[in-house]
Image (tube, rainbow, N blue to C red):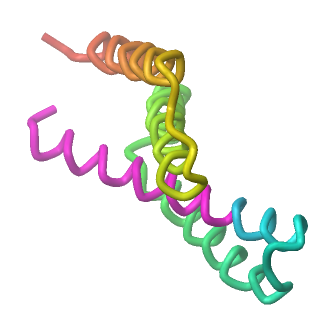
Amino acid sequence: MEWAGLMRAFGLFFATAVAELVGCYLPLLWLSGKGGIWLLLPAALSLMIFVWLLTLHPAASGRVYATYGSIYIATALGWLWLVDGIAPTWTDVAGVALALCGAGIIAMGQRHV
């Protein structure tokens, strides 16, 4: 996969992760009393976008979802820091690094030489 394709795939994974996080975070705000019931409308829209974005991924396979999972982990910890104001610990960073390395190994193992 060339660099442009790799960056396009990464961008799609990242957008999918953000849509999933927003779709789950807004109902949490409502359920915890930190926001109104109206938050359920943008949450539902975000989850619909999440599902639509999943259809744009290269293939519905375990390898694609494993790669998405690692990007989701990294995005969720970024969300924890930027939205919730909780700085990641060294174990968070190490876990993200391991997840991304694992996804890289899975992706690189599928290259046809």
| Above/below status of 79 relative to 67 | below
Where on the picture, by quarter, is residue 93? top left
Residue 75 or 85: which is nearer the viewer?
Answer: 85
* Magenta: main secondary structure: helix
- Give the x, y percent position of residue 41: 73, 85
| Above/below status of 45 relative to 65 | below
Report the side of 11 relative to 14 (left or right).
Answer: left
Residue that extends furthest to the bottom in the rendered view of this protein = 38
Q: Residue at x 82, y 85 (%)?
A: 36
Q: Residue at x 50, y 17 (%)?
A: 95
| Above/below status of 113 relative to 43 | above
In the rendered image, residue 61 lying in the magenta stretch gets the answer no
Residue 96 or 50: which is nearer the viewer?
Answer: 96
Residue 108 or 71: which is nearer the viewer?
Answer: 71
Q: Residue at x 12, y 10 (%)?
A: 113
Residue 88 or 2: which is nearer the viewer?
Answer: 88
Report the side of 104 relative to 86 (left or right).
Answer: left
User: Magenta part of the protein: which range?
Assistant: 1-23
Question: Which quadrant of the rendered structure holds the N terminus?
Answer: top left
- Give the x, y percent position of residue 45: 64, 79
